[in-house]
Image (tube, helix red, strand yellow):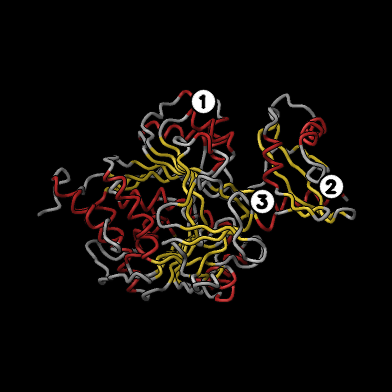
Amino acid sequence: MTLQDPTHPALRDAISATLAQPFGSFTDILRDWSRAQPDAIALVDDTRDVAWAELIGEVERLAARLVETGLERGQSVAILGTSSINYALVFLAAIRAGGVAAPLTTSASPAQLAGMAADSGARHFFIDGGKAAELGPDLMADMIRVPMEDIESWMAPPGSRAPDFTPEPSDPFNIIYSSGTTGTPKGILHSHQMRWRQFGATALSYLEGGLEVRSLASTPLYSNTTMVAFLAPLLAGGTVRIMGKFDCARWLEHAEADAATVTMLVPVQYQRLMDHPGFDDHDLSALALKYCTSAPFPPKLKRKVLERMPGALIEIYSMTEGGVVCLLACHEFPDKLHTVGRPAPGSELKVLDDEDREVPPGTAGNLVGRSQTMMLGYKNRPDQTREGYWTDPENGEVWQRMGDIGRVDENGFVELVGRAKDMIISGGFNIYPSDLEAELEREADVREAAVVGIASQRWGETPVGFVVLAEGAREAEAIMAAVNRRLGKTQRLSALHAIADMPRSHIGKLLKNELRERATKMAS
């Protein structure tokens, strides 16, 4: 059988059969697609597009040069910059060469970046012009430093191939650094086996469903979130458009012009699209599948997305570290939008009290989970890796502590009630911020709400709210009075502050530490 003809009925069957295997090589699948559809477009950004034959050719040339310049099996390749085709090529080349892709967070401080690079063990450092100008020539000067814009001249000559690399399941695939606000963020190691289980299965579902995959990736390539819109579509032989920075108008233009069928957005991006005045002027009818993850997805916003955007809406709840994976098909369960769905096949969940004992259904407790997509551990941090685990005393099974407080209803749907570290203890009573946030968001004036706990001489801690208000809204005091009338005495807000925007990380996670600091200053 030849893989030259993309219309050959055996082609998709052959690739599907490989993807259905318990383990395989990412590079082999990409190479099969390049032979099958050499002229089809694999990657697009605002500067150029790359056909499948070019993709493999440039990945091979980069990988060959990496090995020539000293890359060893299992060694990291550090990448820093705005998402682009060249960024994607370096990521894929690191894996092809037997190395580990180590994308670094662009919002990190110079000290954090130096710490991440040292922690990763990388000797190669790819950086784009924008970050190079910002950080200067001295950062990581002892590494092989390659300007991202000049990778064409740095590659091995055309036609070069890297030495063969056959991955083992336990080989590291990538390091994703956590979004720590102080010190060096933790490096989360993912294996080839984990990534194969995640994205091989997703790609197989696309092929079996007959979906023509045109993905719109608008979150950064250094984020684990983006891998759903980047790696899985490539394994399915699709096209991935890479946006350097998210912009509502440009996202809508791309989605319409490309007839995008798959996308991944975080909640704040969905909110901005819903608020964009030109949203209804664009044809998004090709959208078949929309994902959301990384931050709480308010039920009110889920309803708006279901009403106004075509296609399925899937919320994913998990951690970069792994643990349980919950899926909520919002379009199938409109009465469960207050939940994050049920554990996916192959995932398990337990709810524990503060003494690590299981609690009855419907009772809130600390979530622990496990699945086939668990991290290898934190790079160079065995103690912190162990701290994140819970070992079942009855059978010795290892579970990941999710860091969330939640409860499971009678149908198995998981409702999050807060982060464990964000729980407020006031007068000896546990207060879950999500309960108060839900009450605030019931008010028509409130577009977005967040609640944090601050120190209180009288109660130990007291809840303080922040809201982003709709145009023409009532004063914050009036809203707080209305909400407090519905809350129990121990739950009532002691203050409510209206702000223009919620502070968020690069992928839209709410930065409650900043709100907590602001609330403390206001109280004093």
In-front residue for pair 230/311: 311
Question: Residue 491, position in %: x, y?
Answer: 78, 44
* Earlier sequence position, callout 2 versus callout 1: 1
Question: Label for residue 237?
Answer: none
Circle 2 packing at 10 Å, graded few (<14), some (14-19), many (20+), is few
Residue 2 is at least partly visible in this image = yes
Q: Say which amino acid is labelled 3.
A: Leu
Residue bearing mark 3: 511
Q: Say which amino acid is labelled 1.
A: Gly
Query: Quadrant location of the N terminus?
Result: bottom left
Are discs 3 and 1 less than 8 Å apart at CB? no
Residue bearing mark 2: 522
Q: Secondary structure at mark 1?
A: loop
Residue 520 against residue 369 in the figure, above or below: above
Given this view, does label 2 or label 1 mark the residue nearer the observer? 2
In-front residue for pair 116/447: 447
Q: Say which amino acid is labelled 2.
A: Met
Question: Label for residue 278?
Answer: 1
Please, which residue is most extreme toward the left here? 1
